[in-house]
Amino acid sequence: MTARDLCALALALPLACAAAAPAWRPDKPVEIIVNTSPGTGSDSTGRLILRVLTENKLIDAPATVINKVGGGGTIGLAYLNQHAGNGHYLMVTSPTMLTNHISGKGALNYTDTTPLAQLGSESVVFAVRTESPLKTPRDIAERIRADASSLSFAIGNSVGSHNHIAVALLAKAVGANVRRLKVIPFNGSTEGITALLGGHLDVAATPAGSILTHLQAGRARVLAAASEQRLGGAFANVPTWKELGFAVVATNWRSVVGPKGLNDEQARYWDEVFAKLARLPAWKQELQAKSEEDSYLNARDTRRYMAAQYTELTAILTDLGLAKSADAK
């Protein structure tokens, strides 16, 4: 072998080794971050993702759910942002990530993450405790039509969230002053429901899954759903605001994002993992049991959907006087 041949071989070896190198996969523990309290809708989704991933051996690395609560969801997003480019960190998120930025509550936006998948969505419902004098959805509508501040609403997890938007849309629909609404934000829907059942406020605007066990136990009644069509299961007899003549449709989607700066291999790995998860019959059954819709989107379509949602929510919050970020003006 000539010297020239040896040099050519030496140059080719790194390329061959690079081609043979395995694609990226997690080799350290994976953290699934939830920016709301334990027991909330996002927390439930995060723990379900963890269980389905591990039980079906979709990932080899150990994983755990970490709750980073506070700031209406901004603390969790800030924590994720501290791990830029690290594929071992994921976060379960919802429209609140967008509305926090639009309203100026959070400096970080979906563009400061790597969207990986949308895994489901759930509509907002309006619930009261069983003993409440509010018997029908029209009771709520008429009360706030007469005086927007006459009822107190629990919302999770911040002012300007999709739960808040649902209440504001109802106020708009009946001609009430949306700025006089009495809305009380909690770190998650579970905390708001606890306050509702304790008689500390009048109505909870909450994702359907968060109130399900209390509905089944007879501790709460669900008067209306802010959905395009009636929900199934335990909510089958609950009318929609839309069918009652009120233009109120608000949905909480559950998406998974990674930190900003994931490389192509990291993003592709998680894209493929969540595509497999979304196809599992066990996953679909869990969504149905939680009164959630199967609205799976891959990484590329999730980013596009978030961009479209940002535009739509900016318009709504601007109309309601809540858009304050520079980008939203």
Image (tube, rainbow, N blue to C red):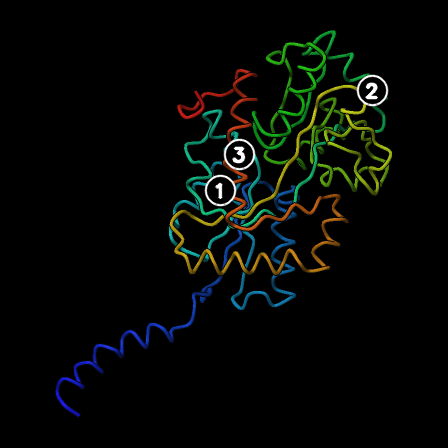
- Which disc number belongs to residue 144? none
Query: Residues at badges 3 and 2 in contact (C-beta under 8 Å)?
Result: no
> Which badge, 3 or 2, comes first in the chain's sequence?
2
Say which element carries label 3.
Answer: helix
Q: Callout 2 environment at 10 Å: few (<14), some (14 to 19), or many (20+)?
A: some
> Distance of mark 3 from mark 1, alpha carbons?
23 Å
Amino acid tagged 2: Leu
- Observer-nearest residue: 316 or 59? 316
Which circle, 3 or 1, is nearer the viewer?
A: 3
Say which element carries label 2.
Answer: loop
Q: Residue at x 50, y 36 (%)?
A: 307
Note whether 117 is above or below 105 in the view shown: below
Say which element carries label 1.
Answer: helix
- Observer-nearest residue: 83 or 252? 252
Note whether 170 is above or below 272 in the view shown: above
Residue 166 in the image: state x and y as whole percent: 66, 25
Residue 102 in the image: state x and y as whole percent: 48, 27
Q: Callout 1 environment at 10 Å: few (<14), some (14 to 19), or many (20+)?
A: many
Amino acid tagged 3: Ala
Q: Mark 3 points at which residue?
A: 308
Q: Callout 3 environment at 10 Å: few (<14), some (14 to 19), or many (20+)?
A: few
Q: Is 315 situated left or right of 230 in this image?
A: left
- Observer-nearest residue: 172 or 179? 172
- Extreme residue in the bottom direction: 1
Q: Is 128 situated left or right of 159 in this image?
A: right
Q: Name the residue under label 1.
A: 76
Q: Residue at x 43, y 41 (%)?
A: 78
> Distance of mark 3 from mark 2, alpha carbons?
36 Å
Query: Residues at badges 3 and 1 in contact (C-beta under 8 Å)?
Result: no
- Which disc number belongs to residue 134? 2
